[in-house]
């Protein structure tokens, strides 16, 4: 393996620092371990890992920011890979509402960030396989 930046061949596995901008906030993720070029510090991260980093950043921002802003909602929706209409359908509202919340033309009711957080958690941690709900009767 050679570094694509400096062609160095020495790597050390360590936690890397990945920064995600969630609306007005910056979230730093130090949980990912990658081989890092010993000479120039370059490393690569897969698209799959980056998606998880964005989902985790959304989760942290939604949980810890004093309020969920329209820009944060838009970031969350894009991280969930949904259109305004798709998000609206999943959380039981109209796409006009989603559009107004994102543009801050209307204040989000308290259930909105919680519903979106539920979708983020679900994507980050899908339900366990091999466990099924048995229908009553
Ligand atoms: Zn390098």
Image (cartoon, rainbow, N blue to C red):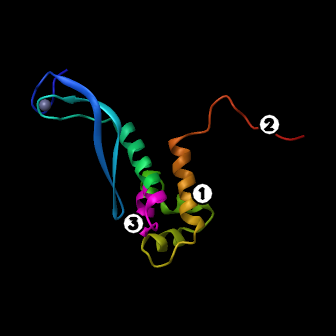
Earlier in the chain: of badge 2 and badge 3, it is 3
Q: Mark 1 — residue?
A: 90
Q: Marks 3 and 1: in contact by CB < 8 Å? A: no
Marks 1 and 3, Cα distance to the nearest angstrom?
19 Å
Whether 85 is drawn above or below 137: the answer is below
Q: Position of residue 107 (x, y in %)?
A: 51, 76
Instruction: Please provide the residue range marked out in magenta.
Output: 61-75
The residue shown at (53%, 68%) is 95
Q: Residues within 10 Å of mark 1 (few under 14, many from 20)?
A: few
- Name the residue at the right extreme: 137
State the residue in front, 100 or 33: 33
Between residue 137 and residue 69, name the one nearer to us.
Answer: 69
Q: Is residue 62 above or below residue 57?
A: below
Q: In terms of secondary structure, where does tag 2 sit?
A: loop
Q: Nearer the viewer, mark 1 or mark 3?
A: 3
The residue that appears at 34% across and 65% down in the rendered structure is 24
Q: CA distance from mark 2 to mark 1?
A: 23 Å
Q: Is residue 20 found inside the magenta-colored segment of the image?
A: no
State left or right for residue 47 relative to residue 109. left
Viewport quadrant of the C terminus: top right
Q: Where the N terminus falls, by quadrant? A: top left
Query: Which class describes the residues within 10 Å of circle 3: few (<14), some (14-19), or many (20+)?
Result: some
| Count of numbered circles on the image | 3
Which element carries disc 1, helix, strand or loop?
Answer: helix
Ligand 1 image-quadrant field: top left
Query: Which dot marks residue 134?
Result: 2
Counting residues from the start of the chain, the first of labels 2 and 1 encountered is: 1
Q: Which residue is mark 3?
A: 71
Q: Secondary structure at mark 3?
A: helix
């Amino acid at each position: 393996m050679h570094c694509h930046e400096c062609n160095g061949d020495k790597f050390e596995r360590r936690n890397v620092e990945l920064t995600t901008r969630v609306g007005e906030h910056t979230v730093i993720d130090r949980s990912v371990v990658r081989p890092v070029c010993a000479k120039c510090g370059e490393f690569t991260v897969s698209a799959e890992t980056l998606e998880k980093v964005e989902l985790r950043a959304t989760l942290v921002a939604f949980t810890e920011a004093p309020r969920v802003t329209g820009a944060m909602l838009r970031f969350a929706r894009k991280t969930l890979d949904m259109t305004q209409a798709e998000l609206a359908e999943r959380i039981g509202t109209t796409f006009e509402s989603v559009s107004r919340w994102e543009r801050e033309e209307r204040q989000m009711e308290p259930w909105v960030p919680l519903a979106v957080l539920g979708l983020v958690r679900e994507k980050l941690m899908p339900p366990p396989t091999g466990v099924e709900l048995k229908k009553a009767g």
